[in-house]
Image (tube, rainbow, N blue to C red):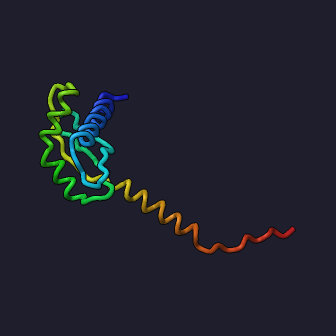
Amino acid sequence: MRRLDRVNELLRREISAVVQRDYEWHGALVTVSDIDITQDLKEAKVWVSIMGGNVAAVLEKLNRHHGAIQSRVMKRVVLKSTPVLHFYHDASAVRGVDLVNLLDAVEQLPKAPVEEPEV
């Protein structure tokens, strides 16, 4: 596993813990789904899944508090430089739920009868 992959995974776990433990989301489920850190470790895109709640409000709160989140994470993760965190919405979970619902709806549609092969 490459070093950046290990750093991404470590940051994902620690940022996720801070986001879950230290912030109240009022009915929204906020999870950190992925991290994409630059080669020089100076910046990191943090992808979050938001189920329920106001997506724009959650992203605004995360980006407004990015400095406090960085500070808490860097107390547990020692890197040469502290990456600046930028939070983005990861809508893949919502798309996945929509796809499952669509497949369930297709399953309920009438089907053509199965033809018996002629012998």
Quadrant of the image occupied by residue 9:
top left
Provide residue 29's location: percent of width, then percent of height.
31, 51
Q: Please tell me which residue is depicted at 87% across the width and 67% down the height of the picture.
A: 119
Residue at the (15%, 32%) spot, across then down: 82
In the image, is 112 to the left or to the right of 100?
A: right
Q: How many marks?
A: 0
Q: Position of residue 70 (x, y in %)?
A: 16, 36
Q: Is residue 63 visible?
A: yes
Position of 3 with respect to 62 (left or right) is: right
Tell me where residue 46 sits by quadrant. Answer: top left
Q: Position of residue 14 (x, y in %)?
A: 27, 34
- Dividing the picture into quarters, in which one does residue 81 lie? top left
- Between residue 46 and residue 68, name the one nearer to us: 68
Foreground of the two, 24 or 44? 24
Please tell me whether residue 70 is drawn above or below residue 30 in the rendered image: above
- The answer to whether one can see residue 36 in this image is no
Is 18 located above or below residue 111 in the figure?
above
**2 to the left or right of 62:** right
User: Considering only vertical position in the picture, is 61 above or below 2?
Assistant: below
Residue at (21% x, 45% y) in the render: 23
Give the quadrant of the N terminus: top left
In the rendered image, residue 61, in percent from the top left (x then y), is placed at 16, 51
